Amino acid sequence: MELVVVGAAIIADGRLLSAQRAEPPHMAGGWELPGGKVDPGESDEDALVRECHEELAIKVRLRRRIGADWRLSDKAVLRIWTAEITEGDPRPLEHLALRWLAPHELYDVDWLPGDRPVIDTLAQEGLNI
Ligand SMILES: Nc1nc2c([nH]c(=O)n2[C@H]2C[C@H](O)[C@@H](COP(=O)(O)OP(=O)(O)OP(=O)(O)O)O2)c(=O)[nH]1
C-alpha cells in the first residue's frame, strides 16, 4: 500500500514557515513543510491538523491543495495544503529550527529533495494563502 505523507504550507504575513528535520540521520538538517504520515483510518486533512499541533503547538485551518500527489519514492507520495494559523505561535517541538521565509528567501534553506518542486510551485504563485 502507498504511504501518504501530508505537509502544510503555513503562510502568515506573506511568509512561508519552514522546519528543519531533526531525524533520521540522513535527513537531519534538511528543511521541510511541517506534517507527517497519515495514520490508518485517518483522513489526510485530519492528519495534517494533528501533525501541526503535535510538532508546532498550533491550530491550523487548511485552505487549498497545492498540486496533486508529489512523488517522494516508489512507495510514498506527499500531499500539500496551504494553511493559516488560527491559534498559537509555532514552536519547534520536534524540529531543530523553524524559519519564516519571505518570497525572496524561499531558496535560502536546504529543502529536502521531495519538497523542491512544491517550493517551485509556491514561489511561482507568490505565497498566496
Ligand atoms: N513532514 C514532511 N515529511 C516530508 C516532507 N518531505 C519529505 O520528503 N518528507 C518525508 C520525510 C519522512 O521520510 C516522511 C514523513 O515522515 P515523518 O517522520 O515526518 O512522519 P511522522 O511525523 O508521522 O513520524 P513517525 O510516525 O515516523 O515518527 O516524509 C515534508 O515536506 N514534510
Image (spheres, helix red, strand yellow):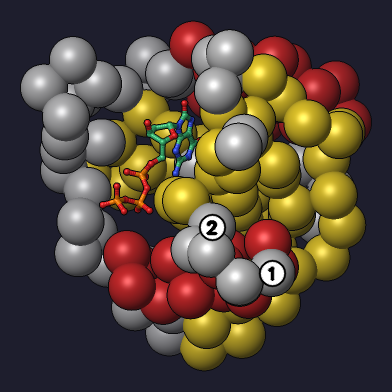
- What residue is pinned by disc 1? 43
For badge 2, the amino acid type reads: Val
Residue 90 placed where, x, y %? 37, 68
Q: Earlier in the sequence, mark 2 or mark 1?
A: 2
Q: Nearer the viewer, residue 127 or 93?
A: 93
- Ligand 1 has an atom within 8 Å of the beta carbon of the residue at disc 2: no
Q: Nearer the viewer, residue 84 or 26?
A: 26
For badge 1, the amino acid type reads: Ser
| Quarter of the rendering occupied by the C terminus | bottom right
Residue 25 placed where, x, y %? 11, 22
Q: Quadrant of ligand 1?
A: top left
Q: Is residue 120 above or below residue 60?
A: above
Q: Nearer the viewer, residue 112 or 104?
A: 112
Is residue 104 at all visible to an observer of this figure? no
**Residue at 45 percent of width and 51 percent of height:** 36
Q: Is residue 18 above or below residue 90?
A: above
**Residue at 31 percent of width and 47 percent of height:** 98
**Residue at 58 percent of width and 13 percent of height:** 74
| Quarter of the rendering occupied by the N terminus | top right
Residue 43 placed where, x, y %? 69, 69
Are the residues at dot 2 and dot 1 in contact (C-beta closer than 8 Å)?
yes
- What residue is pinned by disc 2? 38
Q: Give the side of residue 105 with respect to residue 65, left or right.
A: left
SS of the residue at dot 2? loop
